[in-house]
Amino acid sequence: MASAPVAVVDYGVGNLLSVRRALEHCGATVAVTADPAVILAAKHVVLPGVGAFANGMTALQRQGLTGAVRQVATGGRLLLGICLGMQMLFDDSMEFGLTAGLGLIAGSVVAVPSIASDGRVQKIPHIGWNSLLLPAGRESWNGTLMQDLRPGDAAYFVHSFMANPVDPRHRIADCHYGGIPVAAVVGRDNVLGCQFHPEKSGQAGLSVLRRFLRM
Amino acid sequence: MGAGERGLAPEAHCLAALRSTRLIARLDIKGPNLIKGIHLEGLRVIGSPNEHALRYYQQGADELIYMDCVASLYGRNSLREIVEAAAQDVFVPMTVGGGIRSVDDATDLLRSGADKVAVNTAAVANPELISDIARRFGSQCMVLSIEAKQIGPARWEVYTENGRERSGKDVIEWVRRGVALGAGEILLTSVDREGTRRGFDIALVRAVTAEVSVPVIASGGMGTAQDLVDVVQQAEADAVAMADILHYRRAAIGDVRQAAQAAGLSVRTYG
Amino acid sequence: MKCQIDVTEDPLKVQRRDVIGQYKLPVDVRFCARCTVSNQRPRITFDAQGVCSACNYAQYKREHVDWNEREKQLRALCDKYRKANGDYDVIVPCSGGKDGGFVAHQLKYRYGMNPLTVTWAPLKATDIGRRNLDAFIASGFDNVLGTPNGKVTRRLTNLAFSHVGDPFQPFIYGQTNFPLHMAVKYQVSLIMYGENGEVEYGGDAKNAFRPDRDIEDHDKHYFSGLPPEFWTEHGVSAADLKAFMAPPHDQIVRNRTSIHFFGYYKFWDPQENFYYCTENTGFAPNPERSEGTYSKYASLDDRLDGYHYYLGYIKFGIGRTTSDAAHEIRDGKITREEGVALVKRYDGEFPRKYFEEFLEFCSISQAQFDQVVDSWRSPHLWEQVNGAWRLKHTVWQP
């Protein structure tokens, strides 16, 4: 369990209160902060976010926090991106033209398809509870953020874009929307991401946060 | 079964098949109390909102809805403190409504822990409020709350002020307009069925789900789990809001979830 | 039926009424510190703290009454009156609503009595009212419906409206006296009402501590406060009035008739009666609120009762919302703040829905209606502002 406060990056985007409450519920002391020093002092850093990719990146840059977040990653400390925060970990996004991300996990962010795998129209954004599954090629969740969950456990999603890791080993969990796999949990070493909202996914979400705090 | 047989727009039919039904606990609040009425009246005090919210969360509610029932009367929503307190222990999406009259009111509640806001009276008076909120926070945050009272065969009128005032608006026309303006979800309450335990107004819910492709939450009238199955299977409801059945402890959410699964409905796996 | 009833008067020369004198009202308007009612309700009293007698009674009810003891008294009363041979042993006046329904159901199923429920027909039944009465009967009760001569009723309603400022007076008399007729005819001594209105809602509280009430001798034949000569002058014979009047006093006495109030024996809570009846007697509230108030579960059965409440609002500044909110405040259902907001929003709302029907029922024109209504606006309550009538004192702006 983390002893230094968990830093939740406040760059003006995202429902910080719920994220903070959920982490506190899991036993963490939380600092919601825009101060790079506090962020760099933490062992666990959470990057929340909702809304448009470009807005998020611009806001992060405007706060002067892009460097700090990258340093958390390269310095070996634990970084968890949530929702838009997860998408920002990647190289770039196609939303409203090409925008550069933090480049911490290889891959691009693309639109969730509005046509399902069988050709039927499906609704965007992807909203609601969806089951978490092992991606192709992954045998189990041991040793990952998902260690305490079972395939079929559900989480709450709200998003219109999705991240596509280049390296399949960086996909930890998927969900299926319209028959198409959507990256739900990603991770490369100490850089982790949840497309769903762990602070809104009941016990399953809290299990993910607790596991994160134990890493 | 083809879309034409159900009489639904093709998109609506496809989407319905893919969604799992959400089980939502609805809490009507007055001041410090959780209350429950019949036809939105005779509002009996049930107890502490947060105690009940926590219990429903622990029972496995997929979402919670908090409605402030005196908000319109006082011209303000007073749920901020309750929502803030709930956010400490409740970790599923929360929708908050009642007396929301401006983007500022919505902002206040969203900052306090709400994920979505539900608007009725103020939207009927000023429909632009729907697009203002949707533009600022996204359609997924903007729930259009509709109180519907039957006035003729296959005709329902929009009521406001917690079921006390007629608006003269037709429900189907209004729901179409609301979605066009940016509402991302519909909370549909039948004033005729509310609190009666006689089942949902299937015809009403079906008419609305056929009209729009955003999720529709059926509210008002749930007597047993079978009513939930019926409104999903016969009226394509995407979610069901439960109040009386939970507040009077006639069933727990787990019982309802099991019954839904047994009937072949797709619901979140829980417990 | 659209037939015109005989109206022999000239267009009414309506003189201004002395409301203060007639009802002995205080000139200074004061509102109860706890509920929404004012001192203009006839016979209500306020204590030194400005709390009305109804609120004080409500507190007394909650804090000082031994309800176990009262229940014992009820059982003893029932034991005394219960008949083992299948004859009716209690008359329960009811309209098909929540109060009579509660009383009848309790007496039959909890206390083993054999009630005859007795209903005096509304002037004009609402659909929901008739439906509720049918559902009540279907849930397992014998019922007698007394319907007076329609022509006479209309005439009386017109006269009462025009001369007494309350179209409902004749109905109220009939409703009060019909159970006495039935008690005598069926040889049932015990009549069980719901609550003692004077005690629960703020009137003459002299009977707060007894379960029953005296039956007055009405053989002087005053009706609606007016002497027999008045009625005969206006084309209503003694025979016409008979259905509305009490049976001869000696018959009432020989029947050993006794009127009791269930509200003395059981903690009276109208909203809880409503819930009880939805579960036990098939009662359904109105899905839309009654005009003049927010309530959906009280007084649903007559299309024309709105005009009784409206005249009350004109005479006393006390509308339907004030009364509904007041008892809900006393029963702990709503706060005074909410009650005041409700009164501000709904009190005095004109009952528009059945207005044409009412005018036709009474065979009067809108102009005549307005004249009569305005004649009851006492200057100590009403003023005109920019051509519109306004109460000088309201509970939200005393």
Image (tube, rainbow, N blue to C red):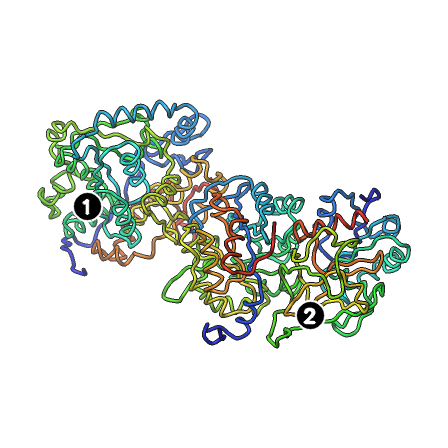
- Residue A176: image location, x then y, percent: 66, 66
Q: Nearer the viewer, residue C354 or C113?
A: C113
Q: How many marks?
A: 2
Q: Residues within 10 Å of mark 2 (few under 14, many from 20)?
A: many
Q: Nearer the viewer, residue B41 or B221?
A: B221
Q: Nearer the viewer, residue C361 or A187?
A: A187
Q: Secondary structure at mark 2?
A: loop
Residue A61 quadrant: bottom right
Q: Amino acid at mark 1?
A: Leu
| Residue B252 higher or lower than A162, as above or below | above
- Residue B260: image location, x then y, percent: 51, 56
Residue corresponding to mark 1? C145
Q: Residue at x 76, y 49 (%)?
A: A211
Return the chain for callout 2. Answer: A
Badge 2 vs badge 1, beta-carbon distance below 8 Å = no
Q: Residues within 10 Å of mark 1 (few under 14, many from 20)?
A: some
Q: Residue at x 60, y 55 (%)?
A: B269
- Residue C15 in view: no
| Residue A59 higher or lower than C374, as above or below | below
Viewer-side label of 2, 1: 2
Q: Amino acid at mark 2?
A: Val
Return the chain for callout 1. Answer: C
- Residue B57: image location, x then y, percent: 60, 47
Residue lying furthest front in this view?
A139
Residue corresponding to mark 2? A112
Residue C279 quadrant: top left
Residue lying furthest right in this view?
A75
